[in-house]
Amino acid sequence: MLWNTLNQTVELGWDFYLPVIMFVGLIALAVPVWAAIGAAAITMLVMSGDLPLSAIGESLFTGIDAFALTAVPLFILTGDVLVRTGLSKKFLDVAEALTCWTRGGFGSATVLVCGMFAAISGSDAAGAAAVGRMTINRLVESGYPRPYACALVAAGACTGILIPPSIAYIIIGLVLGISASTLFLAALIPGIAILVSILVTNIIMNRLYTYETGGNMGLSEWLGNLGQALKSGWYAFIVPGIIFYGIFSGRLTPTEAGATAVVVTILMGFLLGTLKLADFPAMLVSSAKVNGVILPIIAFSAPLAEALAIMGVPQGFVTVVTGLTDDPSMLILLMICILIAAGCVMETTPNIVILAPILKPLADNIGMNEIQFCIMMITALGVGFITPPLGLNLFVVSGITGESILKIAARAIPFVLTMLIVVLLIAYIPAISTTLLPDIYK
C-alpha cells in the first residue's frame, strides 16, 4: 500500500526500480557497498537522463572535497597509534581502579574503557577490536560466560559512533550541511546516556546471575588503587583532553583536533619508547584500509542523492507518510523503525548518506529540531552494531574469540533493549540533545 502510493505520487519507473534491484542484488552477492551504490547511481542517472554522464565524475569529487572529512582518517589513525603505544592499556587500568570497589567491577571497567576509547578514535569497530583483545579473556577469568563477555564488549564499543568525536557525526554533518562541532556538543549527553545504559544493564545482569564476585573494598583501599592508577597513567588522558577542550572550547575544528591528537599521541609513543619508526607502515596501512571503506561510499552517495532528489523521491516519501498519519509521535516512531531495520542490514555510513536526505524532510515537516534528528538517527543506527544479520561489532569480537555470532547476539539482547529505551528518550525529549547547545540551535 505504502509503496503503491509512493509510486503514484512520484511516478516512479524502471529508471528507479532497476537500479534499486541492482543495488539489493549486488549487496546480496557481497559486492562492496561503495561499488553497489556507485552502480545504482550511475544506472539511475543514465536511464533517467536527468544529468549528463560527464557530471558524475564532478559529483564524485565534489562529494569528498570537504575539509571536515580530513578529520576522519586523523581520528582513525589516532586510535591505531593509541593501541600500538599501549596508552589504551592505561585507560583500562584507570577504569578498573574506578570500579574495583563494587561487585562486577571489571565488567563495568570494560564498558568505561570502551567509552574512553570512543572519545578518541570515533570508530566502533576499532574500539571493539582494541578493548576486546584486552578484556575478553579477563572477563571470562572473572566468571563471565564467554558469549556474554563478547556481547558486553560489542555493546560497549557501540559508543564509538555515539560519543564525540564521532566519524558518523562528521559524515551526517557533511551530508546535511550541519557543523560537526555542533553535533559533537549535542551528542555528549546522549552518548553518555548510552554508556550508562550499558553499564547499568551489565550491573543488573551481574546481580541476577552472579557472574563476577568481589568488590569488598574499603574507601581508603579504593582511593589508594585509584591514586596509583592515575599516577602511572595520567598522561594517557592528555589526548582525549586535547580533543574535548579543543573542539568544545571552539579553539580547534574537529580536523585540527584530530591532527593535534595524532601528533601528541605519536610524540608520547616515542617518549615512552613504545613506538618506533618501523611501526609506521603498518599503522598507516591499517588506517588507510578503514578510511578506504568510508570515503568511496561518501563519494558515490553524492550522485545517488542527486538522482533521488531529481526524481522527487524524498519529497514523495514525505507526502506519502504524512498522508497516512499526521501524528508526530507516530511519524517519529516510524522513522526509528526504519533506522533500526536499516542498521540491521547495512553499515552506518551508507545508511547515513542514503537515508538522511530522505528522512530529514519528514523530520522538518513535523517540526523536529534538525540537531535532535541527527542525534536520533545516529543513535538508532548504533543499535545495529549488535543486531544480526550485519552487527559489525558482533563480527569483530567473534573474529577475535572464535565465538559463535548467534550466541553473542543472544547475550546482547538486554543491551539492545536498554539502548532502544535511550533512543526513544532522545526522539521524544528534545532537551537531551539540545541542552548544551546555544539558543540559536534550540
Image: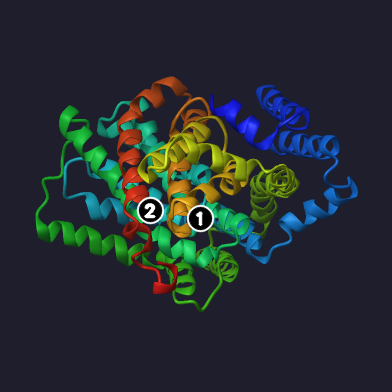
Left or right of 176: which side holds 429?
left
Circle 1 crowding by C-alpha within 10 Å: few under 14, some 14–19, many from 20: many
Which residue is depicted at the point 70% across and 33% down?
A: 11
Q: Nearer the viewer, residue 128 or 21?
A: 21
Q: Quadrant of the C terminus?
A: bottom left
Q: Residue furthest bottom?
A: 251
Residue 191: horizontal and vertical position, in percent?
A: 38, 53
Residue 232: horizontal and vertical position, in percent?
A: 34, 63
Left or right of 50: which side holds 210?
left
In the image, is residue 438 above or below residue 23?
below
Circle 2 crowding by C-alpha within 10 Å: few under 14, some 14–19, many from 20: many
Mark count: 2
User: Where on the picture, by quarter, is residue 234?
Assistant: bottom left
Which residue is depicted at the point 51% across and 79% down?
A: 251
Q: Give the amino acid type for the residue marked by disc 1 in the picture.
A: Ser
Render colour scheme: rainbow
Whether residue 33 is visible: yes
The answer to whether the residues at label 2 and label 1 have Cβ atoms under 8 Å apart is yes
Residue 141: horizontal and vertical position, in percent?
A: 30, 32
Residue pointed to by mark 2: 191
In the image, is residue 244 above or below residue 176?
below
